[in-house]
Image (cartoon, rainbow, N blue to C red):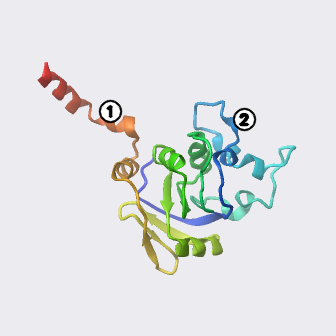
């Protein structure tokens, strides 16, 4: 997992509310246990027609979405069933940050464990982002700050252990493995 410190990117705006995990990555693509290649299926039912051809009017298919690593979504993003494939698909597509006023708890947890930073902002900031697709923003995880092009900055909440893991490009298992020497010393001291 790549560490996240500062992400500077233009935004892609997907203003729909209640985007659930089945819309993010349809269930028929959940047959894999690897993360690679899932970006092709991200929002598959919205990005492709029934014959598999790209829908040119869908926001992720537009040229201006290329290279963007920040997705601004409508309220209640990631609701629905728990599936790690949803953040896997977003990260594989190239997103590192999802911004909304509300992000579903299980999706948020899965995101934090898989290198995707969920950023919850106030309604005013969210409305500005929705009204200004393609805005160049800065997301600074070291200061928990989102900065808009006009210089306005807002803080966002994040649990401290998840923040530590994202800053260091590790997950819970990786963190425990980094503590192997201390664990061994502790166990030997108990013998």
Percent coordinates x, y for residue 128 in the rendering: 58, 76
* Label 2 sits on residue: 28
Secondary structure of the residue carrying numbered label 2? helix
Q: Which mark is residue 22?
A: none
Residue 135 located left or right of residue 173 = right
User: Do residues under tags 2 and 1 come within 8 Å of each other at their CB atoms?
Assistant: no
Nearest to viewer (mark 2 / mark 1): 2
Question: 148 or 127: nearer the eye?
Answer: 127
Quarter that holds the C terminus: top left
CA gap between label 2 and label 1 equals: 34 Å
Percent coordinates x, y for residue 181 in the rendering: 22, 30
Question: 24 or 47: nearer the eye?
Answer: 24
Q: Residue at x 43, y 54 (%)?
A: 4
Which of pointers 2 and 1 lies earlier in the amino acid sequence?
2
Q: Which mark is residue 177?
A: 1
- Which quarter of the picture shows residue 14? bottom right
How many badges with numbers are in the image?
Answer: 2
Residue 97 located left or right of residue 18 = left
Percent coordinates x, y for residue 5 in the rendering: 40, 58
Label 2 Cα neighbours within 10 Å, binned few <14 / some 14-19 / many ≥20? few
Q: Residue furthest bottom?
A: 150
Q: Residue at x 49, y 62 (%)?
A: 120
Percent coordinates x, y for residue 95 in the rendering: 57, 54
Label 1 Cα neighbours within 10 Å, binned few <14 / some 14-19 / many ≥20? few
129 in relation to 27, above or below: below
Q: Residue at x 69, y 48 (%)?
A: 23
Secondary structure of the residue carrying numbered label 1? helix
Q: Residue furthest top?
A: 191
Question: 190 or 168: nearer the eye?
Answer: 190
């Amino acid at each position: 997992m790549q560490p996240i410190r500062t992400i500077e990117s233009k935004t892609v705006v997907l203003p729909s509310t209640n985007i659930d995990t089945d819309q993010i990555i349809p269930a028929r693509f959940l047959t894999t246990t690897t993360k690679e290649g899932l970006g092709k299926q991200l929002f598959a039912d919205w990005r492709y027609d029934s014959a598999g051809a790209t829908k040119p009017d869908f926001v992720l298919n537009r040229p201006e979405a290329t290279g963007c690593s920040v997705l601004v979504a409508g309220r209640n993003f990631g609701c629905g069933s728990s599936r790690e494939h949803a953040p896997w698909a977003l990260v594989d597509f190239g997103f590192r940050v999802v911004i909304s006023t509300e992000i579903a708890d299980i999706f948020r947890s899965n995101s934090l464990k898989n290198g995707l930073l969920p950023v919850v902002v106030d309604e005013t900031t969210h409305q500005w982002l929705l009204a200004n697709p393609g805005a160049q923003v800065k997301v600074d995880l070291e200061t928990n700050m989102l900065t808009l092009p006009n210089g306005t900055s807002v803080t966002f909440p994040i649990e401290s252990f998840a923040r530590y893991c994202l800053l260091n490009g590790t997950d819970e298992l990786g963190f425990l493995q980094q503590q192997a020497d201390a664990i061994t010393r502790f166990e030997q001291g108990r013998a």
